[in-house]
Amino acid sequence: MNFFEIVENTLRDTLGPSLTAFRPEMAVCATIVALLLTRMLAPRWKSSPFWLTVVGAAAALWFAAPWHYLSGETSERAATIFTGMLVFDTFSVYMRSLLFVFLVFFAVLVRVTGVPEREDLTEFFVLVLGAALGMCLMLSANHMLVVFLGIEMASVPSYVMAGMIRHRRASSEAALKYAVYGAATAGVMLYGISLLVGVLGSAHLPTMGTQLADMLAGGHFADRTMVLVLGGLMVMVGLAFKLSAVPFHFWLPDVFEGATAEVAAFLSIASKAAAMGLLVRLVIAFGYAPDATQLAALAPARQYMAMLIGTLAAVTCTFGNLAAYGQTNMKRLLGYSTIAHAGYMMMPVAAMAMLMGGEPAAARSAVSAVAFYVAVYLFMNLGAFAVVALVRNAAGSEEIDAYAGLIYRSTGVAVCFSIILFSLVGLPPLAGFAAKFVAFASVYDAGMLALLAVGLLNTVLSLFYYLRVVKVMVFDTAEDASGAMAMATSAGLYLLIVTAPLVVWGIWWNGLYAWAKAASAALS
Amino acid sequence: MNLLTQPVGLAHYLVVGAILFVAGVVCMATKRNGIGVLMGIELVLNGANLNFVAFGSPSLRADSQYAIGLDGHMAALFVIVLAAAEAAVALAIVLSFYRDHATVDVDEADELEG
């Protein structure tokens, strides 16, 4: 093949299937450019960042077309695009669609609740969309370089978002902590990637999997086991930071407290969903091979990953729930709740690693459990942080004490928040229960009974601190019973729209679960 | 195998990379100055970069089955760019921390706790 043929082939591949599948990301890119140009060309149009972001995210959702790929009519298998750098399958369609749905809701949230520095709204949305672009790459990564690029693209704008409020001590401290911890773990992860890539002789994830299988089957890996284990651990350091898994969780409550509630919502939902998708991808890459003998040879790798992720999940979950008890700040409480939920979401991933060898159908339902959980979690945490932002605007405080007697001052908000909190606990008939049910069911399928016991115990544990907030809202009386809380109609409507799915999906969760099933169909 | 008597090969590069990595981690863990911590991060990234370049070099690898070729060089180039972007953002954040706290000592960042 001469040079011109290579160029010809690459061009045909890029302009044909690759760019077609990449349209959602291109819509996000176009939105970023449009945001910056509008700021320059029409500086008087103050609400342009909001409208452009909503339109851009909706366009990206339109191009991602989950109703087309997840309805079960198309039976397209996974396709790799851009010469194998990215993978395009139903899982990436599902997760990216969730991300774009979140972006639309997030833009509306920022519009409803407002950000402290209004003139920085353009920059804020540029950062949000830039981070979202990185998350898209994380969700469809098929190459170690894209894994690292995606993580960095998602992290670097997030550091700035954490420090958006100027001249506030807590804000710059949060940004510093986030940036230093984030950069340090990313560095360690890169070193781990370099070891894995070097030992396995490829950076292409499926090739790395087959090379690992050959190495394990051939038995000539004895001198490399140490490097493989160490490399895997180092990669897990970077992922654990993004997932806020113990022992790399310490940044999260501080960042949530220092940043605004809206930014905390972004970090706790979008960033977590992307990291969870990437974790699923990496576990599949190193635990699954299409060939039966290779699949059998990968058993030690699956065992290692299941143990590592299962242990991390159990510890993360328990720690998050225990630490949430002593909190007096609502955002810190939700921060620890986020950590605990990251633990719950990692449980089915561990189950998937266990099941992938023998029972592909059960492994697929474990992936759909993760996908389902992420969708429910999106609305639970979005609602919770929306309430925090609304109460902050009305009462000027983010302490739990500020919620005292909320039910007398603003009944609707208190009822919605109670529903959200009950859903976070996982009480039936709310969506949180359905999500926990499918997650725990796949853990049971994998026979990881100890993990299941930890999960159930944690659900009971978490009941008390969520209920404490409900108790404060309903039974405690505020010191300054200043009557009704001033709140715009749009804010109430927004809260209602975000809370509604939790009730609806709690009863009719088949529709969403069918989509989550379709999302996992293309995997293994 | 005594590395000192061998002709220079892959192992030597990996040793230098590992030394850079360890130096960087120690620097990150012990420095109290925020900029010192960032320098440690740069060392870690460059240690990984050296690994990528060494693994990518066909002349260094005896087991050519595992050579990663251009992927290694490409990874190194991307990491250099990323490290620059990350350093720019991190330095800006350190500067904003300095404005609010009049210090770049990371141990002073202890107001958020619980």
Image: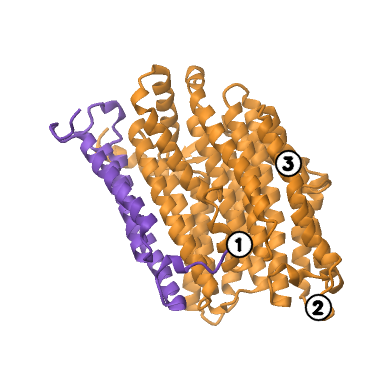
**Which color was chain B given?**
purple
Residue A193 rendering spot, x and y as whole percentages: 39, 41
Residue A468 sits in quarter:
bottom right
Q: Which mark is residue A449?
A: none
Q: Nearer the viewer, residue B40 or A376?
A: B40
**Mark before the other along the chain sequence, 3 or 2:** 3
Q: Residue at x 64, y 41 (%)?
A: A370
Q: Nearer the viewer, residue A315 or A47?
A: A315
Disc 1: host chain = B
Q: Residues within 10 Å of mark 3 (few under 14, many from 20)?
A: few
| Label 3 to label 1: alpha-carbon separation | 24 Å
According to the picture, the residue beneath numbered tag 3 turns out to be A457
According to the picture, the residue beneath numbered tag 2 turns out to be A479
Give the image's coloring scheme: by chain
Letter of the orange chain: A
Disc 3: host chain = A
In the image, what residue type sits under mark 1? Gly
| Label 2 to label 1: alpha-carbon separation | 25 Å
| Residue B28 falls left or right of residue A177 | left
Q: Nearer the viewer, residue A40 or A295?
A: A295
In the image, what residue type sits under mark 2? Glu
Residue A75 sits in quarter:
top right
In the image, what residue type sits under mark 3? Leu
Rendered position, A326 above or below B9: below
Residue B62 can be seen in this image: yes
Tag 1 secondary structure: loop
Rendered position, A127 above or below B102: above
Tag 2 secondary structure: loop
According to the picture, the residue beneath numbered tag 1 turns out to be B114
